[in-house]
Image: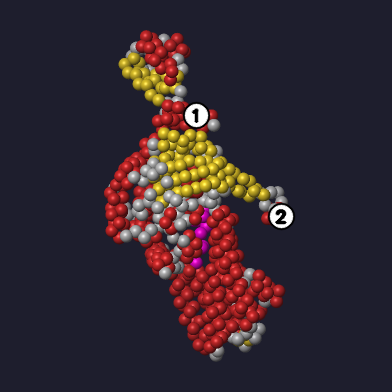
Amino acid sequence: MITVKNLTKIYKTPIRQKNLFQDIFFRKYKETIALDNISFSIDENEFVGFIGPNGAGKTTTMKILSGILYPTSGEIDVLGFYPFDKKEKFLKQISFVMGQKNQLIWDLPAIDSFLLNKEIYEIEDNQFKKNLNNLTSILNCSNLINKPVKSLSLGERMKMELIASFLHDPKIIFLDEPTIGLDIFSQEAIRNFLKTYQKEFKKTIILTSHYLEDVKKLAKRLIIINQGKIIYDGSLKNIIDFYSKEKIIRLTLEKRPEDNFLKKHSLLKYQFPFLVLKVKKNQINQIVSQLNEEIDYSDITIEDEPIEEIIKKILKNN
Amino acid sequence: MKNFLHSLKIYFILSLYSFKTINDHRKAIFFFILGKFFRFLFFFLLLFFVFKKNPSVNQYNFNQVIIIYLTFNFIDTLAQTLYREVYRFRPLLISGDLDLILIKPYNTLIRVLLGGLDFTDLGFLIFYLFILIFFLIKYQFDFLNLFLYFLLLGNAMILATAFHILVLAFGILFTTVDHTIMIYRDLTSFGRFPFDIYRKTLRDFLTFVLPIGIMFSFPPKALFGLLSFENIIIAFLISLILFFLSLKIWGFSLKKYQSGGS
């Protein structure tokens, strides 16, 4: 469905020189490599999470895949099209939701923007009604579509943005920070909607988010990108198995342990009665046996390292 | 044909939304219209008082100067009525909302150039048209010259379109829209007066280098029978070249688009 080979994107920004004459007639440019020869492919019905620090190249990748930006070099095939050609057939099959950008007409009710999209995407009346009903019922927001966009809260507006973007039943959906700035309830509502929508309608979704919770809950496949290069491409489960060398042990103590015990182990946190230890994966059995002998506890849980920590480590090592 | 009708339908919807938005800001629009009306009135009175003392200025009589002024207003207002969206391009560009227009299966250039009809200017356009017709009827014109006048008005609109496309393209390339559009507006204001009042060097520069003269001065000159056949051909050639050049630069600018925001 999406194939990318050796994709490179270089941004050019003018450098201000000391001389105005040179600035005008002999401009010099600074080149920034946003994407450095990346390759990957995405199949139908996949939910892929793109993560990486700011400026890593996540959004640039999605903008090239959707035809917004022109690549510097590389081969791109999305649904059999070269995105930048902006063929009508291609554009009718994709959608792009950007958490920080707005496609709705600010002064008018959202329904007016939906009706405009109906004409732009040439959606049949029955299909439009069906899709609108489906989307408003999943998002539970049929009461909002007739309110002027400017009077909606950020969370409500994002719901309207999603409806506007999904009305034409796109095959591929690009989501760039769809939950940015939203409160936890709105974030949850958007996540639940995306999960239900993808499950029900079998769409290919590519998501970038700074909230790893979004990626953890929604994407099965993860692409980590840093400084324009892909440094991990695989499942969420594999990243934990492969990169996590440590486990977290959480204990609820019955008695205060001896000072020796506290010095011997690498403690993450200790506030009686709670104790958190970080241990090497291959030493887990040995450590648990030691704990049984050395301290009294009423509860013990063994967890994987949080994914945030694993990703931080990967990015740091990279 | 299907594509044209489809585009027309979308244009109609966008125009309707533009009207709804204007309706939401009635008070602000009222003062905007009032300001424009006074500007027109004061300039009209200035011309009236100038001609009260002098029967002609540079061989042009009052009726002819008024036709030149009204022709300028008509072309200028028609361009603003149609291309008002260009004035809203910078926020689109800076916020990055242009991205969401680029992914729509509707021609981006048509969307950012035409948007929807500007109804405040449409009112003025009708007003100017009526006065223009009134003065045209008063003027003893030749039918062939009148035909050339309308043809050159069409040509002026091709040039106005090309200028607005260039403003959009420069906006993408250099993220400056307001400056370019203000330079365009300042230059076009030369067209309020008969071009013959300017020095030859400036006149030639404004006619053949920056074809403002072709836009505003040629149609009334053709009506008065003062334009040579060669100049008419040159006018059409320059317009077509500039129009195709502007489309090329627009295409080039899209390739250089770097997208704002995140």
Q: Nearer the viewer, mark 1 or mark 2?
A: 1
Q: Which residue: 66% across, 83% down?
A: B58
Magenta part of the chain: B83-95
Within-10-Å neighbours for mark 1: few <14, some 14–19, many 20+ = few
Q: Identify the residue position indicated by label 2 in the image.
A: A21
Q: Is residue B134 magenta?
A: no
Please, is residue A43 above or below residue A255 in the view?
below
Q: In the image, is A134 to the left or to the right of A5?
A: left
Callout 2: SS: helix
- Chain for mark 2? A
Q: Which residue: 47% across, 74% down?
A: B124
Q: Identify the residue position indicated by label 1 in the image.
A: A313
- Residue A24: x and y in percent read 68, 55
Q: Earlier in the sequence, mark 1 or mark 2?
A: 2
Residue type at mark 1 is Lys
- Residue A102: x and y in percent read 43, 52
Alpha-carbon span between mark 1 and mark 2:
47 Å
Q: Which residue: 58% across, 71% down?
A: B240
Q: Nearer the viewer, residue A112 or B152?
A: B152
Please, is residue A205 above or below residue A287 in the view?
below
